[in-house]
Image: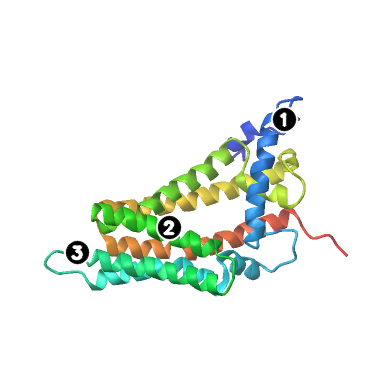
Amino acid sequence: MSDERPGDQAAPDAPVPDGTEQQPGSASEVLGAALGGAARRAGLDPAKQSSTGHVVWAAMGGWRGLLESILPGLIFIVAYTVTIDPATGDGDLWLALALSVGTAAVFTIARLVARQPVTAAVGGLVAAVVAAGFAAFTGEASNNFIPGFVTNVLYGSAFLISALVGWSLIGLAVGFLMGEGTAWRQDKRKRRVFFWLAIAWASLFAARLIVQLPLYFADNVTALGTLKLVMGIPLFAPMVAVTWLAVRALYPPDPK
């Protein structure tokens, strides 16, 4: 069976005629710099001699980042579930939203007081407020998860499209971090690895939607919230590890 993939048609092995790379190259360099900068801030720099465990832990933000990612959602689903009225089948939506947003606010304030970077905490607070807004405006607890669905659609589509057109987002970020720009596109092995890594990330976001959307339409808030947590960090961490190991295999450290 041939190992030909869709991305190969958009990124052929043969040299591209002069001028055809120029326009997308300039845009790709800007995008690659943005993606690479974000990856470096998250501790994902293949040029550094870091262990896989250290990289995954740094990507999650350590204990504080882990708590900031999990606790607001966990508190929402616990508070809503324990207050469900058997007669109506509904929980106390306002209490669950208040506790969830309040928890995210506490994390943000704690970082401000400690004069630590607040980007992750503020992002979590904004996400909690936006999600709460959807639920509060409609009065439906399940609508608290709509922003998450939108995020998965956007990220999944971006990774999938980037792979299919031969400009993998993973490749763009790594190319910037390794100082080779878009030169990786001339290497068939690197193109193939970056293609499949982008497909793997797209599949992760797609899997979340496939599993969680039926629960949303069934208005099963407890199961939906639980699966969102289960398909969050527990799937994100292994995917980061696989990506890191694959990239390190492509760029082995120089022997000393």
Image position, residue 244 (x, y; %): 65, 59
Which residue is identified by label 1?
A: 22
Which comes sooner in the sequence, label 3 or label 1?
1
- Real-space Cα separation, disc 2 to disc 3, in angstroms: 23 Å
> What is the three-letter code of the residue carrying label 3?
Asp
Q: Name the residue under label 3.
A: 90
Report the residue at 50% width, 73% height from top.
110
Q: Nearer the viewer, residue 16 or 42?
A: 42
Q: Look at mark 2 in the image and give the residue it sits on.
A: 127
Q: Estimate the spatial distance between the alpha carbons at disc 1 and disc 2, rounded to whole Å.
A: 38 Å
Sequence-wise, which precedes: disc 2 or disc 3? 3
Report if the CB atoms under discs 1 and 2 are less than 8 Å apart: no
Q: In this view, does 81 lie to the left or right of 6?
A: left
The residue located at (49%, 59%) in the rendering is 123
Q: Tag 1: residue type?
A: Gln
Which of labels 1 and 2 is toward the front? 2
- In which image quadrant can residue 222 be found? bottom left
Are dots 3 and 1 in contact, CB under 8 Å? no
Dot 2 amino acid type:
Ala
